[in-house]
Amino acid sequence: MHLLTIETTCDETAAAVITDELKVLSSVVASQENLHQQFGGVVPEIASRAHVEKILPVIDQTLRKAELTLGDLDAVAVANTPGLAGSLLVGLTAAKSLCLALDIPLLAVNHLQAHVYACRLASGRDVFPCIGLIVSGGHSNLYRCNGATDFTLLGGTIDDAAGEAFDKVASLLGLPYPGGPSIGKAAAAGDPARYRFPRPLKDDRTRLDFSFSGLKTAVRYQVHGTGKLSDAAQLDEQTIADVAAGFQEAVVDCLVAKAELALQQTGYKTLCVGGGVAANGRLRERLQQSSSEGAYELHIPPMSLCTDNAVMGAIAIERLKAGKFEDLSLDVFPGLERPS
Ligand code: ATP
Ligand code: MG
Ligand code: FE
């Protein structure tokens, strides 16, 4: 059985071929980083246009890498929620067209559930029930995950997502986009104790929410002084490294504290982490430490399965096995609201 998975929720055009035994036969990710770099963030219209250009070559390359042809496909799965409307539409339209032309079934993928499913794929065994921590460019959420597609939201960011904060702080510091890897790299040479940034909501044990916009503003004031913007280029390398390290430590402190609180409150013994920020070395280190001290099982996928990819679309195998197929009226749901 060959499932083609398609991912175009944000700024990666990706496809993969996966078997019903979750064996990955091929995976291709075409990043648009260079197109968005000059803007310091993803520009939705540029993203959707680039998806249109890349989607067919990416699918073609994916099939060739798997040494298959279109006729060998048995089903197509596509991430249709959440994400940028125009970007989602490109993947969905490609998936529907293939299903119609090849007369094969269509399956829907929830991109956030797929980020957690990357843990299932990486570990090679069942990880549910678990607490899911999704930390990405658009989301910072905690879920009670009773199954691959059975998620209950426990809390999330009330303003910026963690990845968004990384991207914005990187831009304040004059570091290249995407900010996550740039901050991680700069922070490695920095002293996290030189600047003490706020940890909003971290010690509030009544809620499982995050807030990162005040932290970003605190960095801005530290870097530029109150009100008056100076040029990031004036900052010396050590200051940039120290601010990056102090900021990263503050974000990681909040994420680890709330993940631990979610585990305590629910009594769950497994934490699965997904999304681009899960690629952050310091977060991975701190969670490893937390899991050995807190005696819970931790799953974080390898870097390539943290940022957007189509391999995690293998979650559609679960829907396929449950007979949850879609018809060609399937739409995109840019927000979080689509019931699974
Ligand atoms: P969403 O999954 O919410 O729809 P997205 O798909 O754009 O958003 P991902 O591709 O999952 O997000 O993650 C991208 C984000 O991860 C970016 O904000 C990027 O800066 C951040 N990121 C990537 N690598 C790292 C890293 N090593 N450290 C911290 N952040 C990182
Ligand atoms: Mg991306
Ligand atoms: Fe994502």
Image (cartoon, rainbow, N blue to C red):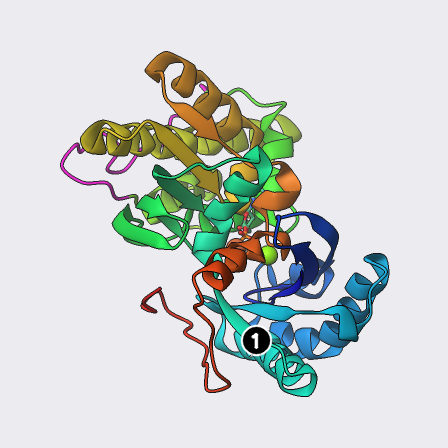
The quadrant in which residue 135 appears is top left
> Is residue 153 rendered to the left or right of residue 12?
left
Ligand 2 positioned in quadrant: bottom right
| Quadrant holding the N terminus | bottom right
Q: What are the residue bounds of the magenta stretch?
A: 193-209
Q: To which residue does mark 1 refer? A: 105
Can residue 198 be seen from the camera position used here?
A: no
Where is residue 318? Give x, y as percent: 48, 56
> Is residue 260 rendered to the left or right of residue 108?
left
334 part of magenta stretch? no
Q: Looking at the picture, which amino acid does disc 1 mark? A: Pro
Which secondary structure class fits the magenta region best? loop
| Quadrant holding the C terminus | bottom left
Number of other residues with Cα within 10 Å of mark 1, as a class: few under 14, some 14 to 19, many 20 or more: many
Please state which of residues 220 and 136 is positioned toward the viewer in this rendering. 136
Whether the residue carrying mark 1 lies under 8 Å from ligand 3 is answered with: no
